[in-house]
Structures are given as structure tokens and as C-alpha cells.
Image (cartoon, grey):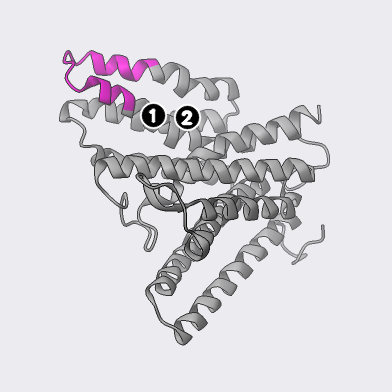
């Protein structure tokens, strides 16, 4: 694949996907502007706000991805921290659990350091094996059992979802070299970011235009079968069209795109259920038009680990 700008040291595949993202953002911004001029309304205003936020989020994701791997790992670690920092106050944890919360925060740099150093075996076991036991034990040592079942359920899950899951984005940089694959970990990272982001947009768009039948009416009434199916099919097609960022064959890219779309929906649905139980609509207001970090990153936390293992199985194991 030829570079768009030959003078850039950035590899051709990365240049092309950045160009595609910019074209989509420009097209969307222009379309919403014209729509707002012709027929103002609540929906188009919401779309304009969401698109402005996507400009900022895409810029941050792209800069973090193409920067030095250390910066990429630090940026991803910050996202895990932001997710925990946003969710823990909403859970109304007991003040006596403060030391456990601090322990959960301390897990973040350890997990991402393991990813950066390529200590894959320990990376995969640190949270779901060791911390899964350590955190409940620390909760028990406080000497009181009231509310301990809830805490034992919440704390390890928060680490698995928002640290362990998200940190698989960083682990993409430790994949073995795959013959004939030139886009590298940056290409894979941008590929996943684009798929999860566009899946969220497409499910929202299909649901708003055609949605009639709710998937989970008591959990998230706005999520419809039409939006889910339309988003999954569209994301699958996009995954195949962008497979130049991956070592995947067309059918493998289709399966991976479908899995990412479904996992993104699952992560969103899980977060919706948690927020409904807490009694809130959005987890915060850090991202205008989208809510908080959890409202936008729930799909990544669910899709990152399956994506990594699919790439490993199709790209590394099959090639070997």
C-alpha cells in the first residue's frame, strides 16, 4: 500500500486509516450542519454535540496510538484510572473500604507495566488469578461482614472490566512478529478503536431511524434489535474493508468485526444495567453529548480482550 504523504515516516496503513477517520468526521459534521440549517431539532443537535466530542476523542486516540509505545501505555493506563475514578464514587462504597480502593488503583500501573515489558503470562494471570483472591481477602481482614458480598462482587469485577479488559489494548504491542503484516500494533490498535467507535455510532443511528423492538426493555429501552443487527452487520462489513490494518483473511476479519460489535453491545448493556441499579443515566459529564468515560469506553472494556485473542489465534497461531 502506497503512502498518502511520502515524506511522513508513518507507515502507509496508518496514514490511510487516519485519512478515512478524518473524512468520516468532516462528512458527518457537514451533514449535521446542513440538516440543522434545513430542519432544526433535538436529534440533529444531539448528533452535532456527539460529533464534536468524537473529533476530540479521535484526535486523542490517534495521537496516543502513533506516539512512542511508552506514551501509548501511559495513555491507556490513564483511561483505566479514569474509569475506576468515575465509577467508585457512584458505588457509594463504605469509607472503611478506602484501603481496598487504593489497592485497586495500585493494580493499574502494575498491569500496564507487565504489558509494556512483555510479561504476557503474568499479565494474563495477575488480575483474574492473584488479585481475584487478594482483594476479597483484604476485605475480609477488616473484621466486619456486613455488605461484604456486595464489595467482593464489585471490586474484582471493576478490575477485570476496566483494567484487565482495557489493558489488552496495550498487550497488542507484544504480539509476535507476523510474516507479511506491516501495519504493526499501531494498526491493530487503530483498527479496534475505529470498529468499537463506529459500531457505537451505527447502532445508535440504526436504532434511531428504524428501531421498534427493544432488546432489553427493562435495562436499556433505547437499545433495539434493529439497531443491534444493523450495527453488527455494518461493523462487520467495515471490519472486512479495513482488514489491511490486520493480518486477517476476509472471513477472519468478518468474524472478528462481528465479535467486536457484539462484545461492544454487551459491554454497553452491562454498564446500562449497573447505572440503572445505581439510579443514574450517565456516569459523568466528562465527554459532552456522551456522558462520562464509562458511557463511552464500556464497549472497549468488553471487546479488547476477545479482539486480542482472535488476532493471536488467527494471526500468530495460524501463521505458526
In the image, residue 234 above or below residue 71 = below
The residues tagged by marks 2 and 1 sit, at their Cα atoms, a distance apart of: 15 Å
Quadrant of image for the C terminus: top right
Q: Is residue 318 above or below residue 268?
A: above
Closer to the camera in the image, 62 or 149: 149
Q: Is 145 one of the magenta-colored residues?
A: yes
Task: Give how far across and how far down residue 162 sits, in percent.
Answer: 43, 37
Label 1: few (<14), some or many (≥20) within 10 Å? some
Horizontal side of residue 103 vs 55, given as left or right? left
Residue under the image location 75 percent in, 31 percent down: 316
* Side (left or right) of 312 relative to 82: right
Residue 296 in picture, x, y percent from top left = 43, 51
User: Mark 2 or mark 1: which comes first in sequence?
Assistant: 2
Disc number at residue 157? Answer: 1
Residue sitting nearer the eye, 311 or 5: 311
Report the mark closest to the observer, 2 or 1.
1
Q: Which mark is residue 259?
A: none
Residue 92 is left or right of residue 158, and the answer is left
Which residue appears at 37% of the width and 63% of the height? 288
Range of residues picked out in magenta: 133-153
Secondary structure of residue under mark 2: helix
Residue topped by disc 2: 111
Amino acid at each position: 500500500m502506497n503512502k498518502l504523504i511520502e515524506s511522513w515516516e508513518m507507515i502507509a496503513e496508518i496514514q490511510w486509516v487516519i485519512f478515512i477517520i478524518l473524512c468520516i468526521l468532516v462528512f458527518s459534521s457537514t451533514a449535521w450542519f446542513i440538516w440543522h440549517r434545513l430542519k432544526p431539532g433535538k436529534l440533529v443537535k444531539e448528533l452535532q454535540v456527539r460529533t464534536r466530542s468524537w473529533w476530540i476523542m479521535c484526535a486523542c486516540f490517534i495521537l496516543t496510538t502513533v506516539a512512542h509505545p511508552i506514551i501509548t501505555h501511559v495513555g491507556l493506563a490513564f483511561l483505566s484510572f479514569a474509569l475506576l475514578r468515575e465509577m467508585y464514587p457512584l458505588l457509594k462504597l463504605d469509607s472503611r473500604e478506602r484501603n481496598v480502593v487504593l489497592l485497586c488503583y495500585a493494580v493499574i500501573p502494575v498491569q500496564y507495566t507487565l504489558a509494556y515489558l512483555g510479561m504476557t503470562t503474568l499479565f494474563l494471570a495477575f488480575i483474574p488469578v492473584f488479585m481475584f483472591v487478594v482483594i476479597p481477602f483484604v476485605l475480609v481482614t477488616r473484621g466486619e461482614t456486613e455488605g461484604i458480598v456486595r464489595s467482593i462482587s464489585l471490586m474484582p469485577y471493576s478490575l477485570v472490566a476496566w483494567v484487565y479488559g482495557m489493558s489488552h489494548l496495550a498487550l497488542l504491542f507484544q504480539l509476535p512478529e507476523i510474516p507479511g503484516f506491516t501495519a504493526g500494533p499501531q494498526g491493530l490498535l487503530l483498527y479496534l478503536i475505529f470498529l468499537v467507535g463506529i459500531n457505537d455510532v451505527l447502532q445508535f443511528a440504526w436504532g434511531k431511524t428504524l428501531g421498534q423492538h427493544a432488546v432489553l426493555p427493562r435495562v436499556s429501552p433505547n437499545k433495539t434489535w434493529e439497531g443491534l443487527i444493523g450495527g453488527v452487520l455494518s461493523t462487520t462489513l467495515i471490519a472486512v474493508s479495513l482488514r489491511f490494518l490486520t493480518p486477517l483473511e476476509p472471513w477472519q476479519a468478518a468474524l472478528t468485526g462481528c465479535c467486536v460489535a457484539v462484545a461492544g453491545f454487551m459491554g454497553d448493556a452491562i454498564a446500562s444495567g449497573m447505572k440503572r441499579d445505581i439510579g443514574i443515566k450517565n456516569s459523568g459529564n466528562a465527554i459532552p453529548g456522551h456522558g462520562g468515560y464509562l458511557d463511552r469506553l464500556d464497549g472497549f472494556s468488553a471487546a479488547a480482550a476477545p479482539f486480542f485473542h482472535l488476532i493471536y489465534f488467527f494471526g500468530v497461531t495460524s501463521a505458526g
